Structure formats: C-alpha cells, structure tokens
Image (spheres, rainbow, N blue to C red):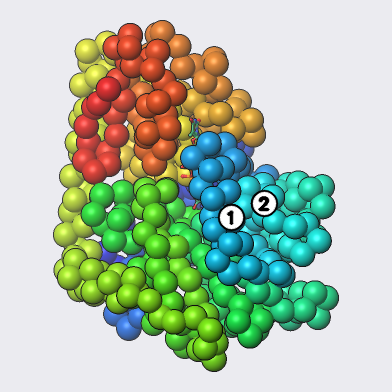
Amino acid sequence: MKKEFLDLGKQPIANGFLNKDDFNNEFLFDLKAVYDEDTKLISLKEFVAPEMMFNENYAYHASMSETMKNHFKSLAENLQKEFKPINVLEIGSNDGIFIRHFDPDKTIAVEPCSNFAEMTNDMEYKTYPEFWTKELSKLIKQDNGTMDLIYSANCICHVHDLDDTFTAVENLLSDDGIFVFEDPSLIRMMERGSYDQLYDEHAHIFSVTALQNILIKNDLEIFRVDNLSVHGGSNRIYVKSIHNRYQEIESSVEDNLSRENKFGLNDFKTYQIFSDRVQKSKEDLVSTLKKLKQDGKKVIAYGAASKVTTVFNYCGIDESLVEYITDTTPSKIGKYQPGTHIPIVSPDDGFDETVDVAYLGAWNFRTEIMNKETDYLSRGGKFITHVPQVMMFS
Ligand code: JHZ
C-alpha cells in the first residue's frame, strides 16, 4: 500500500525552460510523494510522461561542472582498473561526460534526448536515441552481444517501471557482468532536508533497502554500495545477477541497510516528520527573502538547477523576491524558469557588483562555487541556502 506524506503543490516540468510565448499553456502537475509499505520505495504519486521531460530540448548538461567532470573521469578509471570490462553500455549518457573515457569501438550509449544522442554519436559512440526498455535491451544484445559493464548515473531514478528496467539489465549482462548505477540518496535527502530532490524527473528517491527489495525480484542483487558526496549525497550501487559467483557481497551493503533502518527509513512516521520540516523550511525561506527585500537588498539566484524549480514553485517565490537566476548553461540563458517565469541570465550579465545576496540553487556545488566566487565574497556578497536549514553564509 502507498501512503502519501508530502505535498509540494502544483509544479511544472523542472527542466522545461520557457520562452515568453510558452507562458500561457504551461503544463502543471501535483508534486506529491508517497511511501510504499511493501517495498519501502519513495516515489512521486503522479508520474509525468517521459516524452514531456526527455526530448530534443532537454536542458541539463552534466559537463557544466568541473566537480562532475572529475567525478566521472576517476570513476571510469577505477572501473576499468578493477573490473576490466570490454563491452560497456551507458543508460542515459547525456553529453558523454562518462563514456568519453571508454573505447568508442566497445562502448554503446542509450539516450532518449536526441540533442545529446547526436552529440555522443558525433563523438563516435554508437548511440540508441531511445528510452531504455526490455525490447531495446533485446535489440542491443542481438546487435552487439552481452555487456560486461552497464552503467547509469542520475537516470534509473527517472524510470517509472523499475521491474522492466532491471529485467532489461539482467538480460544484457555477461556471465560476470556488473551493473553500476548512482542516484541521489534518500537518507541524505532526509538528513539534509533537501526536499528539492523531488521534481518531475525524479520518479523515485532510492534507499538501499528499497532497491534491494526490487532488484531481487528481478534476479539481481547488490554486492557493494559507495556513499558519494555529489549531488547532495548519492549512492553508487553495484549489482550482479544472482547467478554470478564472481563477486562477493561486501559489508557496505549490510552497513547501509542497518543505517537506514536505524534512521527510520522503514517507518512511515519518519516521513511525516520530514514533511513538517519541509513546511518550516518554506516559511523560513520566504520570510528571509521578504526581509532582505524590505532592507533594500538585491537578491538573485545562482544556478537554475531543476531543484530550484521545486523550491521556488513550492514556496511561491517570484521576481518580486528574486530578480533573476544566473546559469552557465547556454540553452538555459535567455529563457525563463518553469512555473515562476523568473528570467535566466548568464553570470557575465547578472553576477555583478549590484548583487547583495544570491540564493544558491546549485547548493550541491557549494565548494566549487565558493572557490570560484572569491571576488563576490571578498566584497561582502552573501549566499543563502535552505540546506540543511535556511541560512545566509559567506
Ligand atoms: P545540477 C539535474 O538536476 C537533473 P539539477 C537530473 N535529473 C539529475 O538527477 C541531476 O542533474 C543529477 C549551473 N551552474 O547539476 C549549471 C552554474 O550556473 O545541480 C546547472 O544548470 N554555475 C539529471 O538541474 C545548475 O547550476 C556553476 O558554477 O538540479 C546545477 O544543476 C555550477 C557548478 C553550476 O542539477
């Protein structure tokens, strides 16, 4: 049985940046979160059709951050060193940030956003411009044989039908093949109050517990979990077929399961407490921004992340409180934030000496941004965040 615990109101497509012409017929849906008592999975109550989010206009470029470029480079090197995969496949390859470190002759990409599929095709990686399904997995096996490594970052949590996805993976793994994927971690979201991990794309926020319950139904099991700091706290899950005897199940699996249980992730009450905290976060953020406005401060936002769409729409923050949002992504600049219609400008045009306070939308890149924005900080500029609670810092 699924139980609702959080209502983040009417929300638009988080990465659906708008032109002025689009304002009048914007799609909105009810962003609510539910807890499944059987599998312990946290999901959205209402799923948005994948084609509405992942298409030729998809705006999120993973390579906009140095942190993420380094993250995927070192992961690719480590996987090659430890597992020595020959045939490799990535599900949701975005701009090729990960596969660029693998041999194009032996590496295949699956990417339904055609703007990005074209990019990796141009990089000589055979790219299937489609959604990952059982049918596609059969076709890839027929064309290319089985895979020694199937990898996916920030994509499996987008998938509505996890059983279909996992069966498709199981079908394509070689005898000693492994499936490695990473997505935002539920326990980190709960610890940090980062409710903005919830938006249309994130159909689920995974705990290790829920993944174990669902993977096993599809003849797959977790043999290692890495806890990562990226994207506000993620888990990298290493999976093998239950028939694969090459990999031992490591202690990190049990460690994560017991930490989650101790935290209360298997208890509905924990989610109700989280919901109260989210409500308080909203009140604190709005009152802080209103006070800054009254004091005559110029407030903008830094980073038009998907997460900011959730926060600003949930909190009812518009141009009267935040003048504009700066972002480095070329396809976002000159457009408007979904729902609130706050303008997006390039940092060169908007992150200047007139800014007093910047809401740090890309709070997950706090270290990278603080290291970069030393001029702003040294002239007294401040940041504001809601993670783990609403606060200003410099
Ligand atoms: P960022 C996306 O979420 C969507 P988002 C997706 N669903 C997902 O799961 C995660 O990624 C992983 C900008 N920026 O990465 C770039 C600057 O302007 O937190 C981005 O637009 N200056 C796939 O959208 C945004 O901020 C900078 O210095 O929440 C950050 O978005 C830096 C570092 C970033 O992902």
Q: Can see residue 89? A: yes
Q: Which residue is mark 1?
A: 77
Could you say which is closer to the camera, residue 299 or residue 219? Answer: 219
Residue 93 falls left or right of residue 266: right
Q: Residue at x 59, y 32 (%)?
A: 329
For label 2, being within 8 Å of ligand 1 is answered no
In the rendered structure, the answer to whether residue 35 lies left or right of residue 237 reads left
Q: Tag 1's secondary structure?
A: helix
What is the quadrant of the C terminus in the image? top left
| Contact (Cβ within 8 Å) of mark 1 with mark 2 | yes
Q: Position of residue 2 (x, y in %)?
A: 33, 76
Relative depth, front residue between 77 and 264 = 77
Of the residues tagged 1 and 2, which is closer to the observer? 1
Task: Using residue 207 as the reference point, say whether residue 26 is left or right of it.
Answer: right
Above/below status of 329 relative to 125: above
In this orientation, which residue lies closer to the viewer: 171 or 130?
171
Can you see residue 45?
no
Q: Determine the CA span between mark 1 and mark 2.
A: 8 Å
Q: Amino acid at mark 1?
A: Glu
Tag 2 residue? 101
Q: Is residue 257 left or right of residue 61?
A: left
Label 1 Cα crowd, 10 Å radius (few <14 / some 14-19 / many 20+): few
Q: Is residue 115 above or below residue 349?
A: below
